[in-house]
């Protein structure tokens, strides 16, 4: 037996540092900023920390009084992150601007859940000042919250609660009457109306947890909104830390290879893997063997949790619902043995993805995506992610690290639950449609 797999090395990962999310607001840096510049400043700060929101995930808004260019009258304008982009790196031109009076008038056109998607087509008619940035599907969620400044983010700590079997009860326990709860529902017009109704029924709320999804928070000013968001996430994190016994994912099942041998494994594993994964579309790989990843892939529950799939809807398009899990035991197996079984493993994955597509597709669903996995987890070694370019591959890996953090938090609190398969499919393939639209607009 090799040194790196002896039982004495199987230490529980108990020394998880307590996570602290700093408040970075610097009043001096944003002195004399206009409301829209303050919104941008707040957005960039929030997006600078992946624990606050994943890359490209979440959106921010402010309702700002502006002069209508035709009438010269003061009107209320919703500035909200538009379709595409990332709040961490966006610029002012990343915001869509819409007239609030028109958004409110839209309510008269809504005919119910079956006609949700038609509402998206009305959004361009609400545009203020000929802004070319397309409004996103999340726009009604921001518009109808009766507060000036609104943040929607996907923080690992809050999604851990939102993806727990008893998420509503845990939200109540941690936040009492500060936060409301809305069970999972695909983002869209109807969810916007539900959020508004809850805000009006409980005007004391400081935010809302969306089951299986993320967080809405707000404030009367940009800085109040920002601080509310960060403090809410920190409170969720503190609660998870207080419950985390250190035995993450049921404790270790095997010890990882040492670093040099992980790198050697990756250098021999990745070229043939890339060859098979590129059968339909050419791919580039990225390797991540950070401590968090290793704690997960080497754990007792990794295979079971990985098969359940991720929970935050943003993840589906980037990572697919579930990764391929490759069982590698450094004590018994070699790179050669893993490579010998790789063809079969990928073929099984391809078939199961095809079966999932056929089970869940609607008559008007887009064609099946490339059926090969995006994320490949190898126990003892780490996480491999593949996409059409290096940056996308790296970002897909980062998304899965977010998913690992969520699963870890949820497992410490309660029991992790993934979204139902059909919901996940609808998001994955609807998001695909939206991505296509976005490209057309670009
Ligand atoms: Zn979201």
Image (spheres, rainbow, N blue to C red):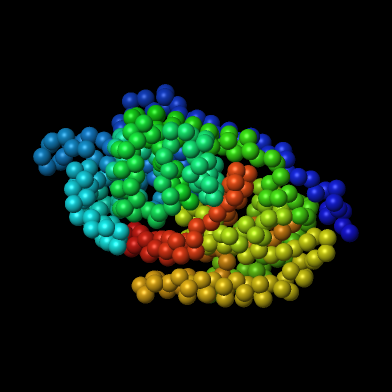
Q: Is residue 372 left or right of residue 361?
A: right
Q: How many marks?
A: 0
Could you tell me which quadrant the N terminus lies in? Answer: bottom right
Name of the residue lying farthest toward the right: 1
Of the 4 image quadrants, the one containing the C terminus is bottom left
Percent x, y for residue 62? Answer: 31, 37
| Position in image of residue 148 (x %, y %) | 30, 34
Residue 390 seen in render: no
Q: Give whichever of 370, 5 is nearer the camera.
A: 5
Rendered residue at 60%/71% (across/down): 349
**Residue at position x 85%, y 48% in the image:** 8
Q: Position of residue 23 (x, y in %)?
A: 50, 30
112 or 389, nearer to the observer? 112
Hey, which quadrant is residue 322 in on the image? bottom right
Relative to 232, does residue 94 appear above or below in the rendering?
below
Question: Which of the 4 quarters of the picture holds residue 41?
Answer: top left
Q: x and y percent of residue 10 in the render?
A: 80, 49
Which of these two is toward me, 280 or 114? 114
Task: Let me know if residue 3 appears in the view.
Answer: yes
Q: Name the residue at 37% across, 53% down.
A: 187
In the depicted view, which residue is nearer to us: 302 or 178? 178
Q: Is residue 195 shown above or below 438?
A: above
Name the image quarter holding residue 426.
bottom left
Would you say 28 lies left or right of 277 here? left
Q: Residue at x 22, y 34 (%)?
A: 65
């Amino acid at each position: 037996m090799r040194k790196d797999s002896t039982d004495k090395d199987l230490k529980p990962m108990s020394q998880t540092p307590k996570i602290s999310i700093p408040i970075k607001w610097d009043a001096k840096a944003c002195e004399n900023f206009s409301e829209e510049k303050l919104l941008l400043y707040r957005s960039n700060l929030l997006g600078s920390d992946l624990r606050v929101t994943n890359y490209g995930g979440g959106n921010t808004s402010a309702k700002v009084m502006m002069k209508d260019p035709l009438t010269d009258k003061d009107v209320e304008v919703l500035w909200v992150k538009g379709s595409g982009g990332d709040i961490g790196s966006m610029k002012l031109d990343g915001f869509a601007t819409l007239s609030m009076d028109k958004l409110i008038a839209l309510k008269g056109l809504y005919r119910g859940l079956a006609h949700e998607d038609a509402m998206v087509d009305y959004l361009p008619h609400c545009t203020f000042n000929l802004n070319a940035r397309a409004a996103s599907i999340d726009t009604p969620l921001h518009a109808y919250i009766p507060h000036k400044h609104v943040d929607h983010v996907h923080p690992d700590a809050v999604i851990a609660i939102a993806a727990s079997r008893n998420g509503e009860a845990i939200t109540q326990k941690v936040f009492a009457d500060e936060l409301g709860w809305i069970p999972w529902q695909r983002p869209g017009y109807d969810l916007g109306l539900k959020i508004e109704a809850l805000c009006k029924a409980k005007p004391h709320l400081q935010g809302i947890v969306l089951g299986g999804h993320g967080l809405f928070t707000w404030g009367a000013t940009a800085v109040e909104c920002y601080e509310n968001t960060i403090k809410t996430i920190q409170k969720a994190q503190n609660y998870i830390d207080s419950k985390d016994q250190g035995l993450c994912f049921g404790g270790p099942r095997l010890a990882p290879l040492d670093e040099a041998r992980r790198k050697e494994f990756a250098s021999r594993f990745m070229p043939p893997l890339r060859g098979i994964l590129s059968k339909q579309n050419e791919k580039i790989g990225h390797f991540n063997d950070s401590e968090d990843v290793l704690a997960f892939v080497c754990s007792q529950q990794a295979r079971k949790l990985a098969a359940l799939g991720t929970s935050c809807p943003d993840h589906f398009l980037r990572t697919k619902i579930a990764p391929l899990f490759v069982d590698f035991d450094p004590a018994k197996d070699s790179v050669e043995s893993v490579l010998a079984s790789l063809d079969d493993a990928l073929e099984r994955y391809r078939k199961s993805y095809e079966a999932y597509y056929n089970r869940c597709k609607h008559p008007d669903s887009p064609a099946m995506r490339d059926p090969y996995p995006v994320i490949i987890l190898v126990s003892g070694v780490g996480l491999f992610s593949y996409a059409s370019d290096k940056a996308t591959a790296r970002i897909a890996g980062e998304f899965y690290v977010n998913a690992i953090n969520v699963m870890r938090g949820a497992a410490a609190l309660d029991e992790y639950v993934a979204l139902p398969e059909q919901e996940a499919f609808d998001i994955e393939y609807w998001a695909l449609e939206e991505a296509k639209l976005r490209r057309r607009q670009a």
